[in-house]
Structure formats: structure tokens, C-alpha cells
Amino acid sequence: MAKKQALGRGLSALLESAPQSVKSENKAVHVTAVAAEIGHVAGPISVLKIGQIEANPFQPRTNFDEAGLRELAQSLREHGLIQPITVRKISASKYQIISGERRFRAAQMASITEVPVYIRTADDQAMLEMALVENIQRENLNAIEVAISYKRLMNECSLTTEQLADRVGKDRTTVTNYVRLLKLPPEIQIGIIEKKISMGHARALINAGSEVHQLKIYKQTIEKDLSVRRVEELVKEDERPKLFATKKILPFEFQKMQADIRLKFGKKAALKRSEEGRGKIEIPFATDDDLQRLVDLLEL
């Protein structure tokens, strides 16, 4: 009968190579490298059965690439799980993942029955914060997942933008740019998730004004494979007043009247007339002397 796969060679490799502080009672190994990643001191490495561990409800990542998981699972079959998962205890025999859910899923896929873990105490707020930080720093979250995670931290942990930026090691502008993505229409957010457009495209689209303009430029970006620079140009064009598009052309006889007015009062004078026959004559002046000249011409 084939022996059930447990830790494989990964744990022994870790124990042989990691910085150690060995306790004489159970030979537990204290490794501080992972602690540095999440900003907390992790406990000694323990071993748990897969069935004792459950997913993190605060996990920022919502999509896990299946092909990537299969590759990781194959690596785990060959080498075992080298990097322990960080968990917290939630009952006598149940534990919840704080960080390392991708490794956990791959271990399940590889039919590994036991995994090395760090066990630590954490409340829900700490769980959310650590899961976010661990994912932002170690995983390739898409921009919308990052934005949602940032927004949750700000709302659920009562953090300001500055405090959040400090937590995740980003500058305030970067955090703000991510959170602003959530103001985009759902269709564009899905496009970001599916990598139809880049973060640069998305940041440009935020400034497109109305949702109608955002979607119009977004669809052009997809159809024509536009660069970020071109999207920025289109956004700026949309911001300009559509003067020429709405300008009415005077009928010929009124164009002649306007020409006569300009000959007498200056080239900037203008005749404006609606289709109903209402309108006005505008004669701008630059100085008081210019005004007096116009008054004299009008014989007032």
C-alpha cells in the first residue's frame, strides 16, 4: 500500500537550513523570517492535519489561478511544503488561515495530509490586516482586489489613508489611486480583473468624467488596443468644451452683416443670432480709449 504523503522533504529542508532556537522539550524551531513579512513574531513551527485548517474569511484574494495552483501542487508533491502556513486557533481542534491560503489550496490539490504551520493569536481586525499585508507583499493580486482590500481596511479597521499607507508600506497617493478604482463602472472593473486594461488605463479613465464617457473610451481602448498615453489624450479631449460642435453657422446674409460690423468696429466684433431671430451684437474693447473710440463710431 502506498504511504500517504505528509510533509515530504520540505519541512526537513526548512529545519536543516533555517535560523534556529531549539527547545529541548519538543525540538521546535523558531523562525523569524516569516514574522518579518507580517510584522509580528510568529510562534514555533507545528504540524497540523489538513482537515484541521479552514480558509480565512478575510482573504482579500477572490480568484486563484488554477494553472498556477497545479504547478505549485506538483512542486509540493516533489519537495513538500517548505514555507509554513500561518494560522490562528479558533477551537479545540480547528485553525483558521491567516496567511498562506494559496499554499494551503495547492497542498490539498497535491493530497498532502499534514502541513507545517505557525500558530498565533489574532482577532478579526488583525486577521484582516495581516491577510491583506501578506497578500499585497507576496501575491499578485489584481488591482480591484487590492482596492477592495484597502477599502475594507479603512472602513472595518477605522484607518485613515495615511495610516493604511503606513501599514502596507505604500505612499498615500498609491493607496488613493487604488481606492478610486472602485468608483469606475462595474464593466470597467471587470475589465481590470480580466486584464483587458492596465492600471495605467484605469487611472486615466477615472478622470473621464461621466460614466458614459468612461465606458465610451474604455470600449475604444479594448477595440483599438490603445496605449495609456492615447487614453489620457482622449480623456483630455472629452474635457474640452465642444465649441465647434455646437456653433451655429450664420446664414449668408447675416455673415455679410457681421463682416460689415467688423470692418467698422474691429475684427473681434460678432453677430449672434438664433433661428428664432433673437440675438446680439458683441463689440469687445481692450482699454478706455478703445471704448471711447467705439462710442464715437456709434455717435452716442
Image (spheres, grey):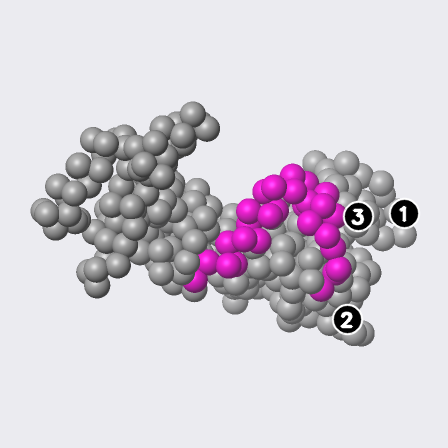
Residue 7 drawn at (x, y percent)? 63, 55
Residue at left 77%, top 41%? 32
Residue at left 26%, top 49%? 272
The magenta region covers 156-185
133 or 286: nearer the viewer: 286
| Element assignment for label 3 | loop
Marking on residue 90? 2
User: In the figure, 138 relative to 67: above or below?
Assistant: above
In the displayed image of the protein, which residue is found farthest to the top? 289
Marking on residue 24? 1
Mark 3 residue type? His
**Mark 3 burial class by Cα count in 10 Å: few <14, some 14-19, many 20+:** few
* Left or right placement of residue 36 versus residue 80 in this view: right
Q: Are marks 1 and 2 in contact (CB under 8 Å)?
A: no
Gap between marks 2 and 3 measured at Cα: 19 Å
Residue at left 79%, top 61%? 122
Residue 155 drawn at (x, y percent)? 69, 62
Query: Which of the two marks, 2 or 3, is nearer to us in this view?
Result: 3
Of labels 3 and 1, earlier in sequence is 1
Query: Which of the two marks, 1 or 2, is nearer to us in this view?
Result: 2
Gap between marks 1 and 2 measured at Cα: 28 Å
Mark 2 residue type? Ile
Of labels 1 and 2, earlier in sequence is 1
Of labels 2 and 3, earlier in sequence is 3
Residue 185 drawn at (x, y percent)? 43, 62
The residue tagged 3 is 40
159 or 28: nearer the viewer: 159
Q: Taking the image as drawn, is residue 198 in sight?
A: no
| Element assignment for label 2 | loop
**Mark 2 burial class by Cα count in 10 Å: few <14, some 14-19, many 20+:** few
